[in-house]
Image (cartoon, rainbow, N blue to C red):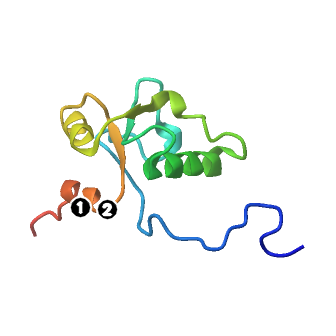
Amino acid sequence: MGPNQGGLGVKAVAVIANHNFWLNTKTPNIRSLRDFGEKDRIAVPSIKVSTQAILLEMAVEKEWGVGQHTKLDNLVVQMPHPEALAAVLSRRTKSRAILPPRRFTRRRPKPV
């Protein structure tokens, strides 16, 4: 069978995001995914389809095992980046999943 017979016929693969994934939170007792509870919320730009949502599901599956990628779906809310930052700062939501360059607008080095 030739390379383009059957299957998907993929000829190339490209990187969508080649950066660290951050999950920022204002809740000091949240140190890992397992610390999120029913009252917590995680903001992502788009549910299920954004890079942040997909990476979050991958991290959840890595933490809890194969087939468990939807374990935190009930905590995920959709919010554009500016609204998500405002919601975290005002404590309407406690966490948000971000990638560069947005993450640089949130974390600034503390003066020495």
Specify the amino acid type for callout 2.
Answer: Pro
The answer to whether 25 appears left or right of 91 in the picture is right
The picture places residue 23, in percent across and down from the top left corner, at 39, 49
Q: Are marks 1 and 2 in contact (CB under 8 Å)?
A: yes
The mark total stands at 2
The answer to whether 71 appears left or right of 26 in the picture is right
The picture places residue 2, in percent across and down from the top left corner, at 85, 75
Compared with residue 23, is residue 86 higher up or lower down, i.e. above or below? above
Circle 2 packing at 10 Å, graded few (<14), some (14-19), many (20+), is few
| Residue on which the image places disc 2 | 100
The picture places residue 17, in percent across and down from the top left corner, at 44, 65
Furthest toward the right, the residue is: 1
Q: CA distance from mark 1 to mark 2?
A: 6 Å
Q: Under tag 1, what secondary structure?
A: helix
Furthest toward the left, the residue is: 111
Q: Under tag 2, what secondary structure?
A: loop
Compared with residue 70, is residue 98 higher up or lower down, i.e. above or below? below
The tag on residue 104 is 1
For image coordinates 51% across by 52% down, the residue present is 55
In this orientation, which residue lies closer to the viewer: 48 or 40?
48
| Quarter placement of the N terminus | bottom right
For image coordinates 14% across by 63% down, the residue present is 110
The answer to whether 79 appears left or right of 63 in the picture is left
| Quarter placement of the C terminus | bottom left
The tag on residue 12 is none
For image coordinates 43% across by 47% down, the residue present is 31
